[in-house]
Image (spheres, rainbow, N blue to C red):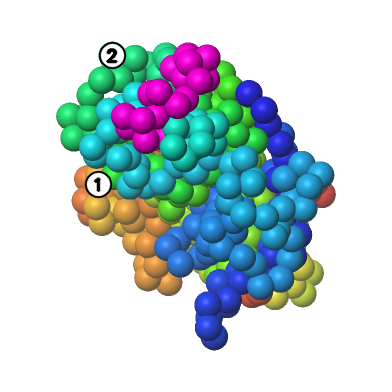
Amino acid sequence: MSQQSIDLRGVSKSFGATRVLEDIDLSVKEGEFLSLVGMSGCGKSTLLRIIAGLEAPDRGSVFIGAADVTARDPSDRNLAMVFQSYALYPHMSVRQNIATPLRMRILTLPARLPLLGRLLAPTAVLAQIDTDVSKAAETLQITHLLDRKPGQLSGGQRQRVALARALVRQPAAFLMDEPLSNLDAKLRAHMRDELAALHRRLGATFIYVTHDQTEAMTMSDRIALMIDGRIEQLGTPDDLYQRPATLAVARFIGSPTINLLPAEADGEGRVTIAGQSTSILARPGPLTVGIRPEDLETGDEGLAAEVLRVETHGPDRFLTCALPTDRSTVTLRQGASARPARGDMLKLRIPPERAHLFGSDGQRVPARITGRVAA
């Protein structure tokens, strides 16, 4: 399988007066699985279409390997795109659907015709197409479906056919635009595993667009989180979860969402959270402190909190608690052995080393704990 790096340099795009992409610089490594993730309207699908050549940027360049392909047609970029809608031909068999990209690339127009083509197409070429189709079908485990029509397939099977049709071209990279969003939750989780396994087997370059952070976090080597046409943070899943660069990233990544509490660093840098002093030191001024639900601790000391709601999620219990000091709420994750009830009073402790600090501009703020760097 061929693979290529993809580089975007200063890519911008507007539709009328609406700016969709703003000076995007992004390098995707050879063989990397990179996800573009963000809310609807953030520009991720437009960016994918620019890479594919389906949209032209207003400014900037697209490179595949060392070649500037900004002005090239989509057919000249050797990229395979997998869509949300599968885009299969309903009148063709699975075998014919998978073979279509090869027939379009290799055969002359007369040789593509259903009846005349059998006489005009070289036998050796047709045999090679059949071999390539069989290999792709075997890779996606759909050999037994080759003679069926798309209408006879389940959603997951149709998605495998769409992937096989992309795979058979042996592209420089795979571009995937929310390919799992039409599937139910159980099948979507299964297909996530299959896509990740396929990427490992092929070693190919994958660029994957999704609004689902779970998909991005579980499959990707790196994630580009997009907000309002910009890349807010680029890094590994652990980077975005453990060290969010901005308040916007912290809010987006994580389920349940991160808890956010008002804080203040005095003139000497000592941080007070929701009225309680801590051992955290940061630059003076107003702050927002983020703490993940699994990082909150209960004990004999800490922030007073009343349990408002208890939700059971298999081995975990999620508690929604109110802080009387400022009327804010936080979410706490506990194990199944815990037996909290609505109305219970708890003491919540924020481990200083697990706290994320953000300034009034939304940017991450470096902090220290008793002389050592915390964030």
Using the image as rendered, state which of residue 235 and residue 47 is in the foreground. Answer: 47
The amino acid type found where label 1 is placed reads Val
The reply to whether residue 23 is in sight is: no
Image vertical order of residue 7 relative to residue 121, above or below? below
Q: Which residue is mark 2?
A: 144
Residue 360 locus on image (x, y percent):
64, 75
Name of the residue lying farthest toward the bottom: 17
For label 2, the crowd category at 10 Å Cα-Cα, with few meaning under 14, some 14 to 19 and many 20 or more, is few
Per the image, label 2 sits on a secondary structure element best described as helix
| Front tag of 2 and 1 | 2
Per the image, label 1 sits on a secondary structure element best described as strand
Using the image as rendered, state which of residue 112 and residue 150 is in the foreground. Answer: 112
Magenta region, residue range: 112-131
Residue 310 circle label: 1
Using the image as rendered, state which of residue 281 and residue 79 is in the foreground. Answer: 79
The mark total stands at 2
The reply to whether residue 68 is in sight is: yes
Residue 123 circle label: none
The amino acid type found where label 2 is placed reads His
Using the image as rendered, state which of residue 326 and residue 64 is in the foreground. Answer: 64
Residue 343 locus on image (x, y percent):
23, 54
> Mark 2 or mark 1: which comes first in sequence?
2
